[in-house]
Image (spheres, helix red, strand yellow):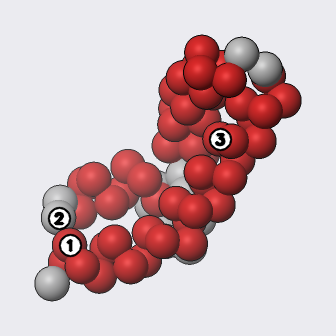
Amino acid sequence: MSEKWIERIFGQGDTQKFSPAFVAKVWEDGLYHALRILENREEAEEAVQDAFVKMYVLFPIFISIVSS
């Protein structure tokens, strides 16, 4: 896996936090698609938030598999 890709997600430094740029871009894209599917802003925001939590929890596992 490219270190540049990892830097785009986490930014420079703390790999326990997503970079603000990554969060903003993925949040915006996720919300757009969730709104189209769910047609309800509150439900769409909740779905995107749930996806971020899952992504945050599972990302270290993904990195360990890909880096092997």
Instruction: Tell me: residue 3, above or below residue 50.
Output: below
Any part of residue 24 in sight = no
Instruction: Tell me: residue 26, above or below residue 29.
Output: below
The kind of secondary structure element at disc 2 is loop
Residue at image point 68% right, 52% down: 50
Relative to 26, 27 lies left or right: right
Decide which of tag 2 and tag 1 comes sooner along the chain.
Answer: 2
Decide which of tag 2 and tag 3 comes sooner along the chain.
Answer: 2
**Spatial CA span between label 2 and label 3:** 25 Å
Residues at marks 2 and 3 touching, judged by CB atoms closer than 8 Å:
no
Residue found farthest to the right: 42
Can you identify the residue that label 1 sits on?
Answer: 66
Residues at marks 2 and 1 touching, judged by CB atoms closer than 8 Å:
yes
* The label number, if any, that marks residue 3 in the structure image: none
**Spatial CA span between label 2 and label 1:** 7 Å
Residue at image point 47% right, 59% down: 10
Mark in the foreground, 2 or 1? 1
Give x and y (percent) for residue 34.
61, 27
Decide which of tag 1 and tag 3 comes sooner along the chain.
Answer: 3
Q: Amino acid at mark 3?
A: Val
- What quarter of the picture does the C terminus occupy? bottom left
Can you identify the residue that label 2 sits on?
Answer: 1
Residue 4 image-quadrant placement: bottom left
Can you identify the residue that label 3 sits on?
Answer: 48
Any part of residue 64 in sight = yes
- What quarter of the picture does the N terminus occupy? bottom left
